């Protein structure tokens, strides 16, 4: 198995083809007022969900 490096991170499966995403159109309903939207990071109440990820994003060996 080849370990190509991309951005300093090992790529165990070599170059992969790009994916095609299908994203539904966002409907404009349940909007926050501008001040609340600015503090929450979104104008859409439906997209205001808790974040359970962690900081980072780079490879960690």
Image: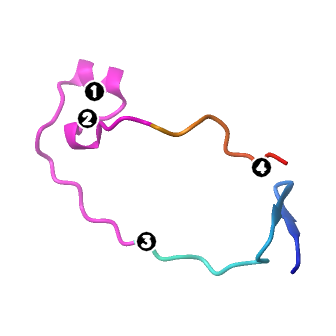
Residue at 67% in and 38% down: 56
Earlier residue among tags 1 and 2: 1
Do tag 1 and tag 2 residues touch (Cβ < 8 Å)? yes
Residue 55 percent location from the top left of the image: 62, 34
* Disc nearest the viewer among 4 and 1: 4
Earlier residue among tags 2 and 4: 2
Q: Residues within 10 Å of mark 2 (few under 14, many from 20)?
A: many
Q: Is residue 49 left or right of residue 21?
A: left
Vertical comparison of 8 with 55: above or below: below
Residue identifier under label 3: 21
**Closest to the observer, 58 or 30:** 58
Whole-angstrom CA distance, mark 4 to mark 1, is 32 Å
Tell me the tag on residue 59: 4
Whole-angstrom CA distance, mark 3 to mark 1, is 26 Å
Whole-angstrom CA distance, mark 4 to mark 3, is 24 Å
Callout 3: helix, strand or loop? loop
Callout 4: helix, strand or loop? loop
Residue identifier under label 2: 43
Earlier residue among tags 4 and 1: 1
Residue identifier under label 1: 37
């Amino acid at each position: 198995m080849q370990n190509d490096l991309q951005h300093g991170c090992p790529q165990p499966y070599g170059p992969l083809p790009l994916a095609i995403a299908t994203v539904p159109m966002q409907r404009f309903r349940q909007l926050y007022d501008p001040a609340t939207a600015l503090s929450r990071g979104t104008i859409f109440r439906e997209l205001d969900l808790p974040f359970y990820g962690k900081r980072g994003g780079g490879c960690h060996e």
